Amino acid sequence: MVTIGIDPVIVHIGSFAIRWYSLMIMLAALTGVLWTWKATQKAGIPGDYAFTVAIWTIPGGIVGSRLTHILDQFSYYAANPAAMIGGEGEAITGAVLGGVLAVWIGSKVHKYPFGKLIDLAAPGLILAQFIGRIGCTINGDAYGVPTSGPLAIIYTNPNSFAPLGVPTLPSVWFEMAWDLVVFAALMIFRGRLKPDGSLFMVYLAMYNFGRFFIDFTRSNQPWLFGLHQAQIITLLVLIVVVPMLIARVRWQRSQNVSDAGQAAAKP
């Protein structure tokens, strides 16, 4: 059992509070951008593509994250519409989907290789999610269901979003551990999958598969069919992505067989 008493607020400047969560989100975004920039350089793609992608990804991720959170808490925001602008509350599932959509739109505008870029960015993206969850740990905004077992977190700072003094499952740590598993898998498959965009699909499939089950340990309100909003989104993503990924793997195998046959036929 771990007790977390860290104040989520680093400092107050007047009525404005700077939180550890905000700092970690900025660090996470910087990590994702720098990873993509370095990866594009190694791949022989102009480095400014990475920053162009960031210009589209970060605002798209912010909007997608906020909209997903508002939909999740729609009854509250319907009664308090002014709270939709600014305030606390984001959702990583919406951030990823909003960011990807923004990058796709940007690829059409700037004519950059969408599939190749998202493959290069995928490991940095899951690493950024890991860093962002450090902020969630301090913030107490992704706490788990109450538990009487030894594997638990107790929050004691009154600025935490978690219930004070209540042992809860470390749901956020389960996700951080899964993020590292996904990162390791992406590093293993990096450069081995074709066509472009396949590695990013591995990221989507693996992350959403793990997130679906991890969310059973989260203290969230049921959204539909007894499932949390994030679980509904992850299921929809899996329904779309997994068949596409299977089709791509089969295509690559057929290409390998064809290439091997052509090589054997050469004198």
Image (spheres, rainbow, N blue to C red):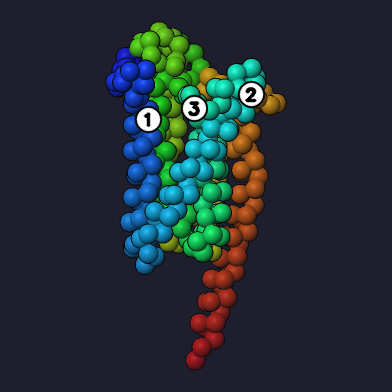
> Which residue is depicted at the point 51% across and 52% down?
103
- Residue holding disc 3: 86
From the top left corner, tell me how far across and down residue 159 is, in percent.
38, 14
Residue at disc 3, secondary structure: loop
Three-letter residue code for mark 3: Gly
Q: Is residue 240 above or below residue 69?
A: below
**159 horizontally vs 109: left or right:** left
From the top left corner, tell me how far across and down residue 51 is, in percent.
39, 53
> Which residue is depicted at the point 34% across and 44% down?
31
> Which residue is depicted at the point 52% across and 55% down?
106
Give the alpha-carbon distance from disc 1 to disc 2, as whole Å: 24 Å
Question: Does label 3 or label 1 sit earlier along the sequence?
Answer: 1
Question: Does label 3 or label 2 sit earlier along the sequence?
Answer: 2
- Residue holding disc 2: 74
Mark 3 Cα shell of 10 Å, populated few (<14), some (14-19), many (≥20): few
Residue at disc 2, secondary structure: helix
Of labels 3 and 2, the one closer to you? 3
Residue at disc 1, secondary structure: helix
- Residue holding disc 1: 22
Res 20 quadrant in image: top left
From the top left corner, tell me how far across and down residue 137 is, in percent.
38, 25
Quarter occupied by the N terminus: top left
Assess whether mark 2 and mark 1 are in contact (beta carbons under 8 angstroms): no
Give the alpha-carbon distance from disc 3 to disc 1, as whole Å: 13 Å
Res 164 quadrant in image: top left
